[in-house]
Amino acid sequence: MSQGVEFNRLMLDMRAMQADAMSMPKAVAAPEMGSSNFADMLGQAINKVQDTQQASSQLANAFEIGKSGIDLTDVMVASQKATVSFQALTQVRNKLVQAYQDIMQMPV
């Protein structure tokens, strides 16, 4: 029975991440103050990845010391969330660097 609950929680988390990802382009499509919006959005994304990694680390430490109420599946899910969010941020960084390089190679 607990595996079904864990699966449902994982599905809810995945849907919430999908909703967050789908809402990001709307913020990009309607900039309020120009280029500072992109910088703010990128900074918020970096902070969110950092928060996810810190939460994962705290959960793992709590599990390691034997704190009650911490399940191994919660630790593993949090760890995977942190890993996926960091990989996504790395891919965004790679795309930004590639776009910058492409722009710099354009003839003037």
Image (cartoon, helix red, strand yellow):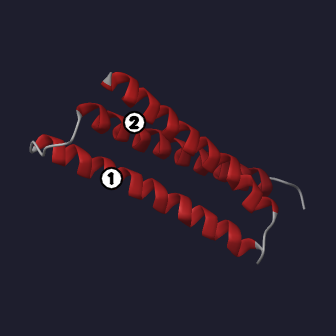
Question: Measured from the top left, where is residue 102 in percent x and y?
Answer: 77, 50
Image point (40%, 36%), residue name: 80
User: Label 1 is placed on what type of residue?
Assistant: Ala
Quarter that holds the N terminus: top left
Mark 1 in CB contact with mark 2 (< 8 angstroms): no
Frontmost residue, 82 versus 77: 77
Quick one: label 1 or label 2, which is nearer the N terminus? 1
Left or right? Give the position of 55 relative to 22. Answer: left
Q: Is residue 54 above or below residue 79?
A: below
The dot on residue 87 is none
Residue neighbourhood size for the residue with mark 1, other residues' Cα within 10 Å, grouped as few (<14), some (14–19), many (≥20):
some
User: Label 2 is placed on what type of residue?
Assistant: Gln
Frontmost residue, 77 versus 40: 77
Determine which residue is flagged by label 2: 80
Seen as rendered, the residue at the extreme front is 1
The dot on residue 55 is 1
Image point (41%, 57%), residue name: 50
Q: Is residue 31 above or below residue 6?
A: below
Question: Measured from the top left, where is residue 40 in percent x and y?
Answer: 61, 70
Left or right? Give the position of 5 relative to 15. Answer: left
Measure the C-alpha gap from mark 1 to mark 2. 12 Å
Secondary structure of the residue carrying tag 1 is helix
Secondary structure of the residue carrying tag 2 is helix
Number of marks = 2
